Image (cartoon, rainbow, N blue to C red):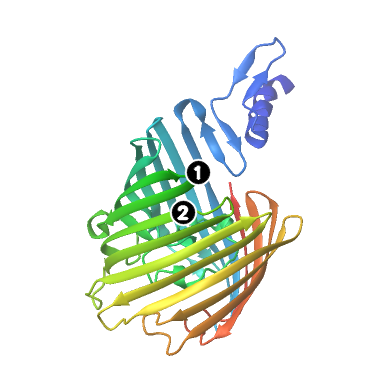
Amino acid sequence: MFKRLKPLTVLLSYLLLGNFTYTFADNTEFHFPLSYQWGRGLSWPAANVNLGGYFNASYQQPEFIQNKTALDELGFFFTWSPHQRIRFFSEIDLNDWLSTTGIDKIEHVVRAERLYVDLLATESTTLRLGKFLTPVGRWNVTHAAPLIWTTTRPLVTERRLFTSHASGFMLSQKVDINDHNLDISFYADNSEELDVLDNQLGFENAIGSRVTFDITEQLQLGASFLDYKNRSITHKTRNNLFGVDLLWKKDGYEVEMEAIYRTAQDNQGDEQGLYLQSVIPIIEQIFVIGRYEYVNGIHRYIPTDTHIGVGGIAWRPFTPLVIKAEYLFGEQNQYVAPSGFFTSISMFF
């Protein structure tokens, strides 16, 4: 009986521990074609294929709104590199599928967050074709919940100001200037024709660019520009968005800032805002987060300037796992980001 169970034991050892080579009693070796590493997914090295993903579950207790516990995001990654200069990548997400308010239909929650191919023309030049995260600022391209410090996200990074995805092409160039990295990207979007599996309104079409420059090893500056038209019945004019951002990191400390200004000629009016966020390590794997936000003119829902403060804590007991808790408060914020307590658990698998 135990001899019959041996292959099963080997398989379970591989799945749980990631071992992909096993030596039998007669010194013959069996090599598993797949290997798993927590946080990095399931790999098939011979085929250059990787499967992974993440989840984010949250509890929200905003003022004057029903409390909610939800599986906010369940994302699946697929990467395939059939050639050293070609890489396919996709991220398919289930958003707000399960919650205390009910279970939504799969067709309503499935969305292709990313679906593209990268063509590496040279070591420093890349052409991306497909659907990708709109490269405005830092928060939007960081994207995955286990990589960000808070359960809530700043208002200036939400879809109220710009669509989080673009569908088209992006050309990126890396330049070395006296050992300082300069990254330049230009992209064009035609989401009206190319977008897939997205149930939310997005771009009709857009063009944009982004530049980042490493001032030092700890400090990086960025700038973004976006000219776009949304798929909307009421807002027919084009929008222009300008943004600047910075990130400073050293010894576990972080300072991050994004500021944007959007113009439009229709009844949306101009919109502007920023956030400034700091991260301070206090004891091993526990961090305190503070954030200030200022916003004015989010699609006419804000009659005056809105000020928001966020104070929170994040615990990263292991690299792929983060547990967060925070309290959000503010002034003139009840319609766009109600005050309250928010907590979540996020993990790469």
Which of discs 1 and 2 lies nearer the camera? The answer is 1
Q: Secondary structure at mark 1?
A: loop
Residue at 37% across, 68% down = 242
Q: Position of residue 289 (x, y in %)?
A: 65, 67
Count the labels in the image: 2
Amino acid type at circle 1 is: Asp
Measured as percent of width and height from the top left, residue 136 is found at 40, 61
Task: Read off the residue under disc 1.
Answer: 179
Which disc is residue 213 wearing?
Answer: 2
In front here: 225 or 18? 225
Q: Where does residue 103 sit, x and y in percent of width and height?
A: 49, 65
- Quarter of the image for residue 24 reads top right
| Residue 247 in the figure: left or right of residue 175 | right
> Is residue 111 in view from this perspective?
no
Position above or below: 108 against 296: above
For the residue pair 333 and 10, the one nearer the viewer reads as: 333
Look at the picture and state if 120 lies above or below 278: above
- Residue lying at 33% horizontally and 36% vertically, measured from the top left: 121
Frontmost residue, 164 versus 288: 288
